[in-house]
Image: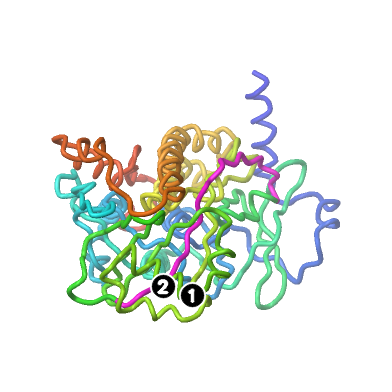
Amino acid sequence: MARIYHDALIYLSLTAVEPPATFLRRMPEVNDTVPKTTCCIIGGGPAGIMLGFLLARAGVSVTVLEKHKDFFRDFRGDTIHPSTLELLYELGLLDKFLEIRHSRITQASACIGDYAVTIADFSHLPTHAKYIALMPQWDFLDFIASEAAKLPTFTLRMGWEATDLLQNGGVTRGVIARTPDGTVKIPATLTVGCDGRHATSREAGHLPLIESGVPIDVLWLRLPRHDSDPENGLGYVNYARLMVLINRIDYFQVAYIIEKGTFPQLQQAGLKDFQESMARIVPFLADRVGEIDSWDKVKLLTVQVNRLTHWSSPGLLCIGDAAHAMSPVGGIGINIALQDAVATANILSEALYFNSLTPHHLRQVQQYREKAVRRTQAFQVFAHRILNRVLHSSGPVHAPLILRFVTHIPGFRHVMARLIGMGIQPEHIAAHRHAAHPGAG
């Protein structure tokens, strides 16, 4: 009864038209207040753009804030897994999406020392696209944003950076944002933080975070690709190192795994040692590692695995990396974020459309998604332990007998394909009877 009474009070405050004047007086100086939106989304990454699209598709007024002026960031994930391609199919967009230049992974393979093994075979998945599509993430974001822009209730603000939350009495009422024309207030019934692992939304909302120790970091670089090079996803493990090659058709996006905190030592050892290390791990790259002739061509990605104890507070919800940073293991971070976005839209669209949102709705998102997220993170933490052993080995690596045995068990590749390609809890697009435009279901 106490919880119901509390939620009822919060609901009344969420639906109030204007905050008290005393609240407005203590806000930072602003130049303007933009019209109120039903949902303000902080962050134009995969979760933010997809959530904005799905809410607008359901007739909800939504504004997405992206602090950069474009989506072009080379350190973002490239893997569009079968679960995400299935979402695009359900939206009627798959064929159009696949017109964008991309490559495909039909099998995921690894070379452990001199032992080559297929880890996953996606050809048996119960999806329309039985492969992982590889394309720069900015192409994916541009595509979803362009489709969302066709909807009358969708607004994307590029170059608008959220700097704080509008709050009163423990309730988030919108966002304060820095824009090219000055600072503005954006009143909103609901604010959703999709602003990544260094989330302003999470910090401003004082949501507590639990960190899991991670023993690895990733160096991100690109090397030329030749037509004769392997096409499928390949990880190479040898000499206390792991490299993953992502086929971007004209070049490889390379993830070079290192022990956490050791990048300065690598730099001190020099570029020549780094080049020789890459050539030793992946011999067919020996004729092109010289392309990395400056440390400016190598980006350090600090790996984190963490999660919020509470994804929400009244008027505020965090999803994707803002709620639970994922490791690059399996390349599944983007797809987990997209699954969060779909579940959020499915759960909240009706309440937002009819202005009946309560904190209970926000807690439902975490209750529904948290188990899948925590299980996925547990799998990644287990993988980190194995990687840590590799990074502390010496000399050539030899595939253990248990691995040789397990990978030949009938059905192993199909099980791994389902885990990697679809995840523990794949989501599906819900139809919304109240949507006010064609094609919303």
> In this view of the protein, which residue sits in the foreground, 408 or 341?
408
**Among all residues in the image, which is located at the extreme front?**
395
Q: Residue at x 30, y 71 (%)?
A: 248
Outermost residue on the top side: it is 1
Residue 112: x percent and y percent? 28, 51
Find numbered disc 2 in the image and state the secondary structure of the residue it sits on: helix
Residue 97: x and y, percent?
A: 27, 65
The disc at residue 171 is none
What secondary structure is the magenta-colored segment mainly? strand
Secondary structure beneath dot 1 equals: helix
The residue depicted at 63 percent of the width and 59 percent of the height is: 36
In the picture shown, does residue 307 fall above or below 438? above
| Discs 2, 1 touching: Cβ within 8 Å | yes
Res. 238 in view: yes
Magenta extent: 204-224
Question: The N terminus lies in which quarter of the figure?
Answer: top right
Which label was assigned to residue 271?
1
Point out residue 102 in the picture as x, y percentages from the top left corner: 26, 69
Q: Residue at x 58, y 70 (%)?
A: 268
Q: Is residue 314 magenta?
A: no
Could you tell me the amino acid type at mark 2?
A: Gln
Give me the disc on residue 275. Answer: 2
Residue drawn at 70 percent across, 54 percent down: 165
Q: Is residue 349 above or below residue 364?
A: below
